[in-house]
Image (spheres, rainbow, N blue to C red):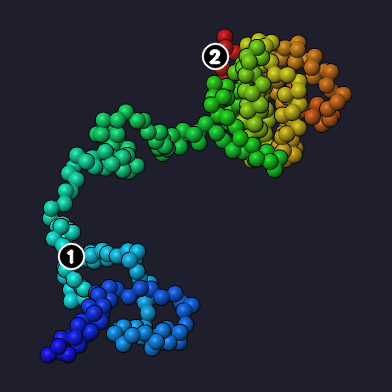
Amino acid sequence: MRAVKSRKKAVSPCSETQWDRDSQAPAAVPLGMDLASDSKMTSEGDDCRPVPPTSLPLQGGASQRKKLSAPRISLSLDHSEDDLGETPDDLDINVDDLDTPDEGDYLDYTDHEMDWEDPNAANRSGTNDSYNTIPTYSSEEERRDVKLWRTVIIGEQEHRINMKVIEPFMKVVSHGGYYSNGVNAIIVFAACFLPDSAREDYHEIMENLFLYVISTLELMVAEDYMIVYLNGATPHGRTPGLGWLKKCYQMIDRRLRKNLKSFIIVHPSWFIRTVLAITKPFISAKFSSKIKYVNSLDELQQLIPMDSIQIPECIIK
């Protein structure tokens, strides 16, 4: 009986030591520690010591922190079988409970977008922004512009005539009918309708008027023709200069110079006679032979028919 008790007492310390060591977690073993030496230490110890584990954790110990994984959130509106777990109730999104903007929240944006499409949107939205619209070009304005400018070809060159500038002076040249066999044209040039040389735009008017006279001659003349120059009732300021007359003659087509049969000057002034006398040595003899002076309308009527010639009122008086 005593032997049994003593035996129990001998076993109990080992049992207590074993239970105490089992309750503690195994300490981390350095990676460089030899397992053979560990086995030797185990064999030399008491039989009551526990057998060490065959595998060692790489990390652990009392200082290791516990990591918590976040719950999985499902962004889909309906649950499927692939979901690993259910999301908490506070993380579920109810689309019906979301606040949507009303019309007052995006009214300004819609007005801004309308400004790009509708020019009258600024008036409806309360803004005062002005829009620079492209003016329309009506057919009436196009016809008016065509009347203001005329394109002519003189000497194989294209020229543009400003018809608005010469509009008050277009009566300077007119068609006086025909003579002889009814084919030869009579061109009337009334100097009293020329602009005054004191005007600021005199040179511009005379330049466009020169192109108009030359282009009109080419349209009126088909065969032989004559020019009747009406110099009566023309002040000295409206008498064309020698350079302008010379330019007209030089710019006339060769056909027109050749077909000119007579150049009649009605009511010639001393200035006209002097100019022609000075320039006579510089002009061709053929052209000089075509110049004739007529002192009255009655004398002119004896040379050519006057039915279609329009004499200005200032000359008749």
Q: Amino acid at mark 1?
A: Thr
Say which quarter of the image contains residue 101.
top left
Q: Residue at x 61, y 35 (%)?
A: 160
41 left or right of 18 in image: right
Quadrant of image for the N terminus: bottom left
Residue 259 in view: no
76 left or right of 273 in image: left
* Nearest the eye: 17 or 141: 17
User: Where is mark 2, residue-wise?
Assistant: 313
Q: Position of residue 128 (x, y in %)?
A: 32, 28
Rendered position, 100 above or below 235: below
Q: Residue at x 73, y 19 (%)?
A: 241
139 left or right of 74 in image: right
Q: Position of residue 129 (x, y in %)?
A: 35, 30
Q: Amino acid at mark 2?
A: Glu
Q: Residue at x 55, y 29 (%)?
A: 163
Rendered position, 230 above or below 137: above
Q: Position of residue 18 (x, y in %)?
A: 25, 80
Say which quarter of the image contains residue 214.
top right
Q: Position of residue 315 (x, y in %)?
A: 60, 13
The disc label shown at residue 87, or none:
1
The disc label shown at residue 68, or none:
none
N-term-proximal mark, 1 vs 2: 1
Q: Nearer the viewer, mark 1 or mark 2?
A: 1
Report helix, strand or loop for mark 1: loop
232 left or right of 44 in image: right
Report helix, strand or loop for mark 2: helix
Compute the Cα span from label 1 to label 2: 111 Å
Say which quarter of the image contains residue 77.
bottom left
Quick one: which residue is furthest to the front in this view? 2
